[in-house]
Amino acid sequence: MIDRSHPLSVKRQAELLNISRGAVYYLPKPTSQRDLVLMNAMDRLHLDFPFMGSRQLRSALRRQGHDAGRLRIRTLMRKMGISALAPQPGTSQRNAQHKVFPYLLRKLAIKRSNQVWALDTTYIRMARGFVYLTAVVDVNSRQILAHRVAITLEAVHAVEALQEAYARFGRPDIVNTDQGSQFTAQEFVDAVIGHGVQLSMDGRGAWRDNVFVERVWRSIKYERVYLRAYDSVSDARTDIAQYISWYNSERGHSSLGDKTPEQVWLSNLQPLREAA
């Protein structure tokens, strides 16, 4: 976007593009091919064994022939936005300055659509590099209400997905997330609380409530992502969007009585009250 040969100064170009002048000089360091191979192997292991922390991942990776130390694996786990799904301290990579909200789903019977939505972000491999997929999922029906594919882990992508879900499907009673920094950011908190929706965050001992989202990720990755080698971010966006459309409207789920998420969402939607 910035053209250093243009008559306009770099400062003025940054102002017109509404970006920080300091960011103009930032040149992101590409992820090495060695790390990409390691991250792809970690992604598969995390999907199959989400309880594995850095120690267990190190051992499993070494058995597969990958030589990496625990500190390197921890660094890549943070980069990928993954953590062990187990009741232990420090499992979410959150910003310590951000407020954490209480967990509201314990002992809550979720029996209807739009009662609880969940947001989560996962790592998506490409032929050369990776992206992040953030999705809004209706907990009762498993329908993916909105999603975003992006190259960064930022709150803006979660906010955009949530706002799209609001526009298309209304408002839930509760939005549940983990304690990732993109979900504890004030921008995301305002997008939830500001619309009269309660915000719930997974905490210690609440790891099981994220399992159904992990199953959604498993379906997307094993049924589509791992069968592809996306050459670009736009290819990934297009193909994942096509899969999600099929997943919602045509893929039956055994846990839903072989119905599709879309069918269950519609059948379990609470009817609007008639005007008096």
Image (cartoon, grey):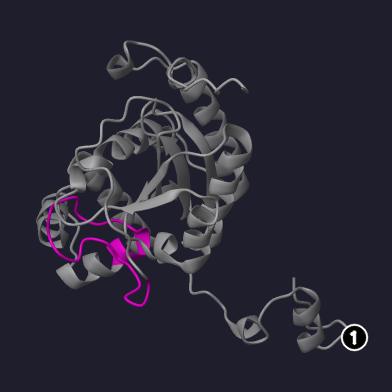
Which residue is depicted at the point 39% across and 25% down? 112
* Left or right of 187, for residue 76: left
As rendered, which of 102 and 249 lies closer to the eye? Answer: 102
Give the magenta part as a residue range: 76-98
Looking at the rendered structure, the number of numbered marks drawn on it comes to 1
Percent of width and height locating residue 85: 19, 50
Would residue 140 appear left or right of 25 to someone viewing this image?
A: left
Residue placed furthest toward the right: 7
Left or right relative to 41: residue 127: right
**Residue 265, horizontal then vertical, whole percent:** 46, 22
The amino acid type found where label 1 is placed reads Pro
Placement of the C terminus among the 4 image quadrants: top right
User: In terms of secondary structure, what is the magenta stretch mainly?
Assistant: loop
Q: Residue at x 81, y 85 (%)?
A: 12
State which quadrant residue 220 falls in.
top left
Q: Is residue 268 magenta?
A: no
Q: Is residue 261 above or below residue 147?
A: above
Q: Secondary structure at mark 1?
A: loop
Quadrant housing the N terminus: bottom right
- 86 within the magenta span: yes
Using the rendered image of the protein, determine whether residue 210 is visible from the camera's viewpoint. Answer: yes
> What residue do we see at 39% from left, 29% from top?
142
The residue that mark 1 highlights is 7
Q: Nearer the viewer, residue 38 or 233?
A: 233
Foreground: 270 or 44? 270
Is residue 50 shown to the viewer in this render? no
